[in-house]
Image (cartoon, rainbow, N blue to C red):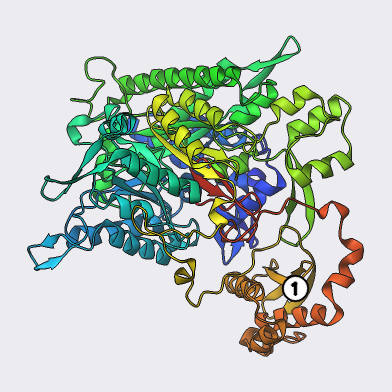
Amino acid sequence: MKKDGIILSFTEEISKSRPKANLTANARLILEKRYLKQENGQVCEAPEDMFYRVASVVAGIEKKYGKSEQEIKSLTEEYYALMANLEFMPNSPTLMNAGRDLGQLSACFVLPVEDSMEDIFDAIKNAAIIHKSGGGTGFSFSKLRPKNSMVRSTGGVASGPVSFMKVFNSATEAVKQGGTRRGANMGILRVDHPDILEFINCKEDNREITNFNLSVAVTEEFMEAVKAGLDYDLIDPHSGQVVSRMPAREVFSEIIEHAWRNGEPGMVFIDRINKDNPTPLLGPIEATNPCGEQPLLPNEACNLGSINLKLMVEETDDKKVVNWEKLGAVTRLAVRFLDDVIDANQYPLPIIEEMVKGNRKIGLGVMGFADLLLSLKISYASPEAEELAEKIMRYIQTEARLESKRLAEERGVFPNYQGSIYEGNLELRNATLTTIAPTGTISMICGVSSGVEPLFAVAYTKTVMDGTPFIEVNPLFEQYAKQYGFYSQELMEKISEQGTLAGLTEIPEWIREIFVTAQEIEPEWHIRIQAAFQKYTDNAVSKTINFANSASTEDVARAYRLAYELGCKGITVYRDGSRQEQVLSTGTLGKKEDASQQQVNTIIPRPRPSVTVGVTEKVKIGCGNLYVSVNADDQSICEVFTNTGRAGGCASQSEATARLISIAMRSGISVEAIIEQISGIRCPACIRREGVNVTSCPDAISRVIKKYRDIGLNNSLAVVQPSQAKTKAKDKVGNACPECGRPVNHESGCVVCIHCGYSKCG
């Protein structure tokens, strides 16, 4: 709403009694950049406005179920408080799109890929529509006939699943989800497809098929053949005929070898997934969403949400314990919220709306599990953590089913209930209720650990957008350090250099035991925690199994076998640093190729350094003010950032210019050549405005770069460079955030950047 041209937030205009969201400064920056409404390039709502916008849209749907205006108003306040208190957060598309023109609220989609050119390109078109709306897509390419098989209708030969995956990848690259969320896909191929080896090998070059996560759909038959050392059948999906046999252990070894090299492919245990398929009469499940936690039927979608476990704690008799009553209340309200989202959603395709409303699947999960353990002083790598994980998820699933049963009594069971696994046993509103999803960005909004992952670091050096580094310390660790008398700034700096507490004997041993990080935890414990949550999760669990760089292929193989044995529905691994190493092998079993054949006229920019120093200068332009930040490391000026003032300006064009300049600098192009190219560019808004001394935004950027090139940026800033700027540098090629260039984390089957909020999967 506007008053005298000023946009007022609802907290000022509607009510001062509602709770204000307890958001960190970093969370507010992420919301401003990615979620909040904008008008003319300027943010026009507060985070509290966003929560109220979402709450009112989702609660408003209950009018169709006979709720009065007063009941809807009351429910709106409950939904608002649920989010503003950070107790629960829906998936990103719901936060972004509820109450806006797009109105697409689901995160997860699976589209069919049938074996005809028309169907394949229909799938590409539909995927583009979904990516534009903010969703991620999963595909099984298992129905496509093998490479070089005959196509009778044309007399030609088939190009095979992998070639079409590259077409899907290019389409995703072009769409980029309208600039709000990058496209993300899951590509799945059955292990008994004749092209399985080409599929396993297709991402040896990390620059190929970059918009896909890959998983092999392995069958029970295959896993038993691996155990027994037997051959297994490869089946042409077009004819249904066995075309050859392969040694199961050799194929398994190929999967392991490539997962060891760069984390892909993962595995999904497809028979186990279909054993839990709630609606088997509608057909088998063939694929999952991009991070593997949401198996779906073709043309099905699901909306997700996560409970913040960090806030499900209370103190009793001077001891912190799980507040089960609060957890139950939040679970029940969250189930109702997610069921309402199904009706509030504007679906990208009619067939998807039909499938979603027929099954009414929702995926309620958790985040902040590591924080919960720290509050309770329990080590992640322990039987106590495993037991608690199972107990929490059993409780959430029980409460979720009770609420779905209440909703079924109030509104009716899901339309495809007849013939489902529940018929005659349990009347539910929703075919599935629980999912453990990656919570990359929403966990940053809530200021908690992601999903069911452990900590990635106890403290680290974070560089904000103006180039200033500062130490970010886990709040619970800082609290304990002060409470137990071992806090010092020097210690925090030391921890930030190595990220962990290993070897720091000045810290009590019990603190070192509970503040273990992902890299320190044995893979077995990662898998045991995943399996504990999976035991009471309807869908699946998104989790990354972390390995040290020194891990062997046998270590990875052991993890894959253990995940299968413990009842997981899939597994994703990441060996530290593996995606930055040059991969030398290519092709099928035993075939190797010289690395030089893979590098043809390609310039790879040096990675964005972990620590830079810089200056920010305000320049008057035709649209107001432009703030230009120029940063350098110990080699040279290496990046430029821009920001427009409140009066506006071409924010997106300035940001694009700055990004291209930064990548050019780190690719070895001289500063002089860059200045020459962008100086003197003319913009009518600048040259017509009195008092403006630059001819355009690019010209302003060139002048600031030239000024600090001439005076020597590093020397001029030596006095302000903080001593704590040292950090553990791991941002090699392939491990840099595509948006800000800083190092990313591999977690929950996803890739996230803690610096700018980027998440590959949202």
Image quadrant in which the N terminus is located: bottom right
Identity of the amino acid at label 1? Ile
85 over 497 or under it: above or below? above
Task: Identify which residue is drawn at 66% across, 21% down.
Answer: 378
Q: Is residue 389 visible?
A: yes
Q: Residue 575: image x %, image y %? A: 55, 45
Across the whole image, how many numbered discs are drawn on residues? Answer: 1
Task: Identify which residue is drawn at 37% across, 19% down.
Answer: 406
435 vs 485, nearest the viewer: 485
Q: Residue 473: image x %, image y %? A: 76, 40
47 over 3 or under it: above or below? above
Q: Residue 659: image x %, image y %? A: 61, 70
416 vs 494, nearest the viewer: 494
Disc 1 element:
strand
Task: Identify which residue is drawn at 65% across, 80% down.
Answer: 669
Residue at the spot of label 1: 637
Q: Residues within 10 Å of mark 1 (few under 14, many from 20)?
A: many
Q: Is residue 106 visible?
A: no
Apparent side of residue 221 relative to residue 184 in the rendered image (left or right): left
Q: Quadrant of residue 585?
A: bottom left
Q: Residue 227: image x %, image y %? A: 33, 29
